[in-house]
């Protein structure tokens, strides 16, 4: 497996692999040979596009919070990362946007990115989450797509 990139802030941890990994939910079904949904998951994993960015937000670190708080936190982090990708000239799949004025014109990000929410994120304001998302994505892009 290719080397992964890990970076964090006080409220989030970002893990990135240049290769597409099987998501944990799909792995659960793939490891159960008699599960009725397994053939569908096998087909979906076999035919998913490998040249895009597959990313997810995990709330596993804030299980002590109520479900409504976890989903609220996850949604805020997803929105912040979507905005950070757009600021860097990428769409939600890591492909470049059409605008000529954006910094990463022609470059794309592919692989698997997992964002783990940490407990301080629950009390952080949205502007702080946006700043953290932008910072983490900047570090990742500087590592993966170095300037020429």
Image (cartoon, rainbow, N blue to C red):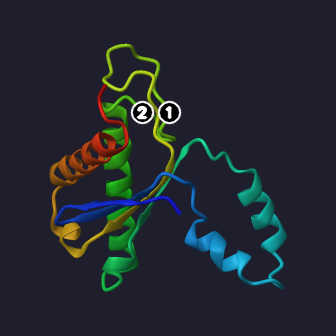
Q: Position of residue 46 (x, y in %)?
A: 76, 56
Label 1: which secondary element: loop
- Compared with 126, 119 (above or below) is below
- Compared with 133, 64 (above or below) is below
Q: Residue at x 40, y 67 (%)?
A: 71
Q: Are there few (<14), some (14-19), or many (20+) residues within 10 Å of tag 1?
A: many
Q: Position of residue 113 (x, y in %)?
A: 44, 56
Q: Position of residue 23 (x, y in %)?
A: 57, 66
Q: Which residue is mark 1?
A: 95
Q: Are there few (<14), some (14-19), or many (20+) residues within 10 Å of tag 2?
A: many
Q: Residue at x 33, y 21 (%)?
A: 102
Q: CB under 8 Å between callouts 1 and 2?
A: yes
Q: Report the front residue among 89 and 148.
A: 148
Label 2: which secondary element: loop
Residue 88 is drawn in which quadrant?
A: top left
Q: Report the front residue among 111 and 89.
A: 111
Q: Report the front residue among 134 and 78.
A: 134
Q: Position of residue 68 (x, y in %)?
A: 37, 72
Residue 113 in the figure: left or right of residue 120:
right
Residue 4 is drawn in which quadrant?
A: bottom left
Q: Which residue is mark 2?
A: 90
Q: Residue at x 43, y 60 (%)?
A: 3
């Amino acid at each position: 497996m290719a080397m992964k990139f890990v970076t964090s802030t006080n409220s989030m941890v970002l893990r990135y692999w240049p290769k597409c990994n099987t998501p944990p939910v799909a792995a659960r079904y793939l490891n159960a040979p008699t599960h009725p949904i397994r053939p569908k998951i096998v087909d979906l994993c076999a035919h998913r596009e490998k040249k895009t960015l597959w990313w997810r937000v995990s709330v596993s670190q804030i299980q002590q919070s109520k479900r409504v708080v976890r989903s609220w936190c996850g949604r805020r982090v997803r929105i912040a990362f979507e905005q950070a990708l757009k600021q860097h000239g990428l769409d939600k799949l890591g492909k470049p946007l059409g605008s000529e004025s954006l910094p990463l014109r022609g470059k794309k990000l592919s692989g698997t990115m997992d964002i783990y929410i940490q407990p301080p994120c629950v009390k952080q304001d949205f502007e702080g989450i946006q700043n953290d998302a932008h910072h983490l994505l900047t570090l990742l892009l500087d590592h993966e797509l170095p300037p020429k």
